[in-house]
Amino acid sequence: MESRTSLASWQALTKHAQEMKHTHMRDLFDKNSERFAQFSIQLPPFLLDYSKNLIDSKTLTLLTELAKECEVEAWRDKMFSGERINSTEDRAVLHTALRNRSQKPIMLDGVNVTEEVQQSLNHIKAFSDKIRQGYWKGYSGKRITDVVNIGVGGSNLGPQMVTEALQQYSDNSINVHYVSNVDGTQIANVLRPLNPEKVLFIISSKTFTTTETMTNARTAMKWLVSASFDESAIAKHFVAVSSNKKNAMEFGIDKENIFDMWDWVGGRFSLWSAIGLPIAIDLGFDNFIELLEGAFEIDEHFCRAPLEQNAPVILALLSLWNCTFLGAQSQAILPYDQSLHMLSAYLQQAEMESNGKSVTWDGDEITYPTVPSIWGELGINGQHAFYQYLHQSNNVVPADFIGSVESVTPVQGHHETLMANFFAQTQALMAGVNEEQVRADLKAKGRTQDYIDKVSPHKIHKGNRPTNTILMKRISPRSLGSLIALYEHKIFVQGILLQICSFDQWGVELGKGLANEIQKEIESGEVTQNHDSSTLGLINYFKTLSKETVHNAS
Ligand code: F6P
């Protein structure tokens, strides 16, 4: 397959990037009073302002040209229609079918996926209603008060991020908890205050083989059985979400209590499926549907809007521009909304597990930088931690600022302060402050010439740091669904532009396999593998010390 670097638009962008590197955004704003109108998109759930990027109209034309040359629209249509675009696993990629609110049939191997999804939604509704209304009873006849979701990665981050974000929409009839870490501290802390008679466990694992999840699930089962003295209690307290029904049943979960999951849903895109069961239980089924509706709204936009007005396409093109052409290596996600405190962790998996790869679909080495590392924190907390770096380090970190016009929890005076910071930061990152301004300011404050000479270099902010601003009207199930879908499609387009298979995750397998072997060595006390001297030294140190700890304790 032809390398992206040989495309005419790619070559033109490489040349154009050299010119733009000598341009300052401040000058672009000074020269063009229409910049905001020209480089922003208003959609019902949010406004996307991307004018504070180092771009001009030529950049946008060339980037759009690149999207055309890469056939982004044709690839998008392949995804939505169920073609097997996950080429390394020979699978379709149909998370959009999970929120296909049009009910349009989608055929895959002779099966109408839309119908299957509807059946699964019916199952989620019936079950979540039963739990919420107290009709589902535990082994001693008491209603369920607490649900513990056991899962990791995509089987944890999506539901947890969403339920945390939408707490204001919960009636708190059920407390939902999450266990993802195999560090026993987490499950022990979660279970300690709970009453086994009133707890329901959801074992969420697409594969039902993930060691961490299986270990936590076994611990939960032991905890339940040691309280109930009855293995039949398991059926009343354990359900699973998995595409591996066989393993889930062997584990001891009743067939009727296993929710569907399909191989055409990637883990990190799965919150719209029964993996979202904790969302339906915590917030109610209607709110779960609202989330799907919001995502569907963006699916429609993605499918219909022209490339140059297509929000996910624009975000993907800008990421490519900033990273591949201008050399940025990381990107910050900075929500100015307490509800979104888990968003950067969620997007970290979504983007980095999808596109953190270095070979093309055909297995050829990629010769240019691909996607950035994603990191972030709530904006205000970040301001008092790492914004110094964003403003003045010699690495440029493009950032997405996400805020809301209305707070979900208005407290007098707070939202104005929060949003004043939100607006101030992108202005400062873009415009910066030059030496002349710094000196004039210090002079106006009556500082001595010596002081001005000494301090001025430290106070200069070069600016020219790219940001996108996503201004939501309000965080709601619907708008959150839209926001997540916006990023999902951005990631998809990135993959197409970079010729990366976004839907596999082979890069996590090597470490998993080695861990399984090392665990056997730790448990048997016998080191059988060839390890480098560092790993061997560390394992031996651990074994010696843990033996001593056991010995001292006994
Ligand atoms: O190890 C990575 C991963 O495979 C993710 O892609 C996935 O979301 C997570 O593990 C959990 O997998 P499962 O749902 O199969 O337990």
Image: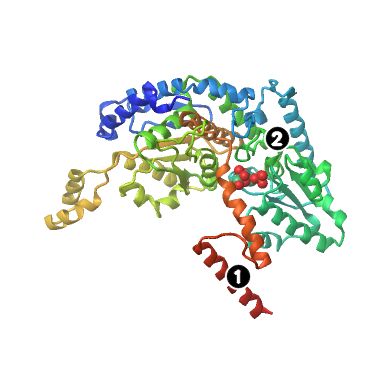
- As helix, strand or loop, the secondary structure at mark 1 comes to helix
Q: Position of residue 61 (x, y in %)?
A: 37, 21
Q: Residue at x 44, y 47 (%)?
A: 379
Q: Amino acid at mark 2?
A: Trp
Disc 2 crowd rating (10 Å Cα; few below 14, some 14-19, many 20+) is some
Q: Is residue 207 above or below residue 470?
A: below
Q: Residue at x 46, y 21 (%)?
A: 307
Q: Out of 418 and 97, give the one closest to the viewer.
A: 97
Residue 543: assigned label:
1
- As helix, strand or loop, the secondary structure at mark 2 comes to loop
Q: Earlier in the sequence, mark 1 or mark 2?
A: 2
Query: In the rendered image, which quarter is residue 41 located in?
Result: top left
Is 396 placed left or right of 172 in the picture?
Answer: left
Disc 1 crowd rating (10 Å Cα; few below 14, some 14-19, many 20+) is some
User: From where the camera sits, is residue 335 visible?
Assistant: yes
Is 256 placed left or right of 442 in the picture?
Answer: right
Q: Position of residue 124 (x, y in %)?
A: 75, 38
Q: Are marks 1 and 2 in contact (CB under 8 Å)?
A: no
Q: Out of 485 and 38, give the one closest to the viewer.
A: 485
Is 49 placed left or right of 92 in the picture?
Answer: left
Q: Is residue 466 above or below residue 533?
A: above
Q: Amino acid at mark 1?
A: Lys
Q: Position of residue 194 (x, y in %)?
A: 73, 60
